[in-house]
Amino acid sequence: MENTQLEGASRPAPAGLLAGKVALVTGAGRGIGAAAARLFAREGARVLLAARTEGQLAAVAREIEEAGGRAAHVACDLADPDAVRAAVERAVELYGRLDVAFNNGATGVPPGPLDLVEEADFDRVYAVNLKGVWVAMAAEVAAIRATAGRGALVNTSSVGSLMGNPELPAYGAMKRAVNSLTASAAVTYGPEGIRVNAIAPGTTLTEMLREWDERSPGVIDRLNERTPLRRAAAPEEIAEAAAWLLSDRASYVTGEVLRVDGGMLS
């Protein structure tokens, strides 16, 4: 007799994209980082959320726990190297290992041409968006080596790093430098089984974008006109790309700056 069964009747449920992994997410209090923390937890990861905004972090972590996920949080200013290293160490203390990290935290600057950028703003965006990422990557590589042995990092860049950026020149410059760090790390740590990639979001409905639109009314509409999909992304759409790159399903992808931009640079 032919052995038949109803489709899906006894198939095991598919494992989550990040099942069994420990993930660190910076900038996790809001926007892309909060969306990523929620998604990573749904996909099976134990997540440590890090950002300056402890109240926001606690709310996101509580939401994850109430949904059945595993999450904790730690206050961390990315401009403080000791705090960044402590956040990485905390992930290992809590969960015994580190497998993946999403270096998403960033700060913005007032829009305007290069000659009007305040030196203090330039220094701040350097400290958070570039040096903070460098410090985090170094600490994360060390933690992965010492615990999981193999793993993956994803850095948040920007589509603005891939072209001239007259309205946000300092921001674009730091993100372009992140692309370089990503490529260098991919070459350096690939032989150890540590993959390093970046995502370059296009127009995304985050608090940072809305603040830019308040200072430069109509900027979201102008950006959408330049985007073939004619809309901005939800933070969750950007988080999906990061989750895939961190997962084993992207096991042969490293050194990539993946545009998630609705076709803006096509």
Image: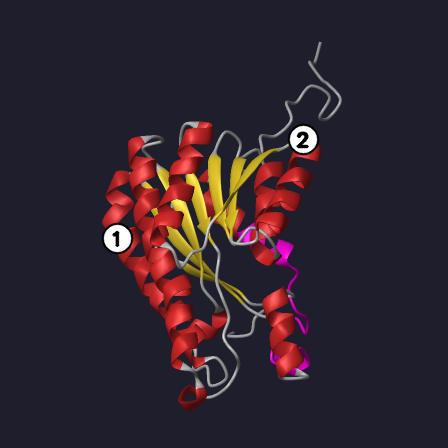
Q: Which residue is the site of mark 1?
A: 187
Residue 7 falls left or right of residue 237: right
Mark 2–mark 1 distance (CA, rounded to whole Å) = 37 Å
Residue 54 locus on image (x, y percent): 57, 48
Part of the protein shown in magenta: 219-241
How would you classify the magenta stretch by its main secondary structure?
Answer: helix
Residue 53 locus on image (x, y percent): 57, 53
**Residue kind at label 2, given as amino acid type:** Gly
Q: Residues within 10 Å of mark 2 (few under 14, many from 20)?
A: few
Question: What's the colour scheme?
Answer: secondary structure
Q: Quadrant of residue 125?
A: bottom left
Q: Which residue is the site of mark 2?
A: 68
**Residue kind at label 1, given as amino acid type:** Val
Counting residues from the start of the chain, the first of labels 2 and 1 encountered is 2
Confirm whether residue 162 shows in the render.
no
Against 137, residue 119 (above or below) is below
Q: Residues within 10 Å of mark 1 (few under 14, many from 20)?
A: some
Against 117, residue 265 (above or below) is above
Residue at 31% across / 32% down in the picture?
149
Q: Pointers 2 and 1 in contact (CB under 8 A)?
A: no
